[in-house]
Image (cartoon, rainbow, N blue to C red):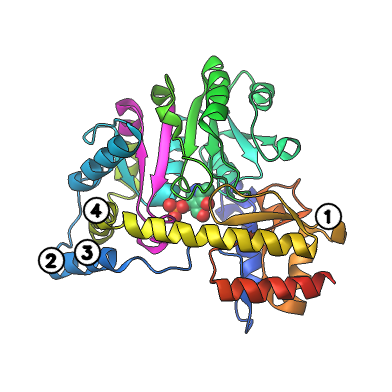
Amino acid sequence: MKDIISKKVQDMQPSGIRQFFDLVLGMKEVISLGVGEPDFVTPWQIREAGIFSLEEGFTSYTSNKGLYKLRLSISRYLKNRYGLEYCPDEEILITVGASEGLDLALRAIINPGDKILIPTPGYVSYGPLTELAGGIPIYINTRDSGFKLTPKLIAEGVEKKTKAIILNYPNNPTGVSYTKKELEELKKVILKHKLLCISDEIYGDLTYDFEHTPFPTLSGAKEHTIYLNGFSKAYAMTGWRVGFACATKEIIAAMTKIHQYTIMCVPITSQMAACEALVSGRKSVEEMKREYKRRREFVLERLNAIGLECRKPQGAFYAFVSVKNTKLKSLEFAKELLKEQKVAVVPGVAFGSEFNDYIRISYASSMENLKEALSRIEIFIK
Ligand SMILES: Cc1ncc(COP(=O)(O)O)c(C=O)c1O
């Protein structure tokens, strides 16, 4: 039986987040600050567009690259908002969330043994997807630089077969982001070493303290970037599964080859809803962002009062909290907290083995839940 499953998959560790949340399933009265998705439902006009498209009988496949109308809207949106120009015909691909974009990007560029730089703590799928594509993840620990990449850290990580770096800002799980000036510095070293930058900017719209700068807007960076984004987080559309990738026509053509054999196209209903999101959804994005910002302030204030250390997140909806003082390892902390106070958080070890003294709290949960959960955490700590 053992031989049926490929060696690569056998060696793969199940997601630390999933493993832990299997424990949560079935428990009653748990407040979960674990999942990485908005607590809001998709704004009504977007849902209505999806429903209406079904009523109108739009039930077919679309072009492999996605509805032209959606690609055009994305292209116009990026141009108007950031001055970023991508041709809707050749340089944009609609994907099943940023997740598929990430998988396609890695599979399209990796030759066996190529190395990919991955900053940690980082999103759980970067390493496993790199390995599935035949690459070797090279992790860059950002603990000593405030969870931020620096030009020096990148340069130190580069080896002969290093092909690309995955950037993610605002970051999951730390909420750390970069100003344009900081990105310029990172860009210099990335270009110097001729690396491709896979820039996962799924939380770009949820940046609180300064303007978000997409990596390809930096001078000279566009040709060397695969820009990934999507509708899941900012528009509260996780279940619709719509994302997009923008890159040179060669890269998008390569990604489309894989996409056409595996996925064919993103469901048309979701694509129609995404078109509406870009028309009427922006107001809701701003409203949700204001609410996340309010929650961020509250969570930070409470964590401070409890005596748990946390750097101020600049974006996304996560707080990465040090539990070092409790002397508990992250999984132990999360399990005990769940057992004693029925609050679910994600153990930091899920985001990199060196982060066993952290937990991730998601503040994409109602203020009422956050208040109660933090009171319970306070009791637990005491
Ligand atoms: C950093 C990051 N990238 C990508 C994704 C995947 O998002 P999507 O729903 O667009 O596939 C997530 C989801 O949690 C994420 O946190």
User: Residue 324, which numbered label?
Assistant: 1
Q: In which quarter of the image is residue 283?
A: bottom left
User: Residue 57, which numbered label?
Assistant: 2
Q: Is the residue marked by circle 2 packed among few (<14), some (14-19), or many (20+) residues within 10 Å?
A: few
Q: Name the residue under label 3.
A: 49
Task: Give the residue type that dot 2 points to.
Answer: Gly
Give the label, 2 or 3, closer to the camera. Answer: 3
Labelled pair 1, 4 in contact (Cβ < 8 Å): no
Q: Position of residue 346 (x, y in %)?
A: 66, 61
Labelled pair 2, 3 in contact (Cβ < 8 Å): no
Q: For the magenta stretch, what is the residue range?
A: 225-253
* Ligand 1 has an atom within 8 Å of the beta carbon of the residue at disc 4: no
Quadrant for the N terminus in the image: bottom right
Give the label, 3 or 4, closer to the camera. Answer: 4
Give the label, 1 or 4, closer to the camera. Answer: 4
As measured in the structure, the alpha-carbon distance from the residue carrying label 1 to the one carrying label 4 is: 46 Å
Labelled pair 4, 2 in contact (Cβ < 8 Å): no
Marks 3 and 4, the one that precedes in the sequence: 3
Task: Give the residue type that dot 1 points to.
Answer: Lys
Marks 2 and 3, the one that precedes in the sequence: 3
Q: What element carries label 1?
A: helix
Find out whether residue 111 is within the magenta segment.
no
User: Residue 219, which numbered label?
Assistant: none
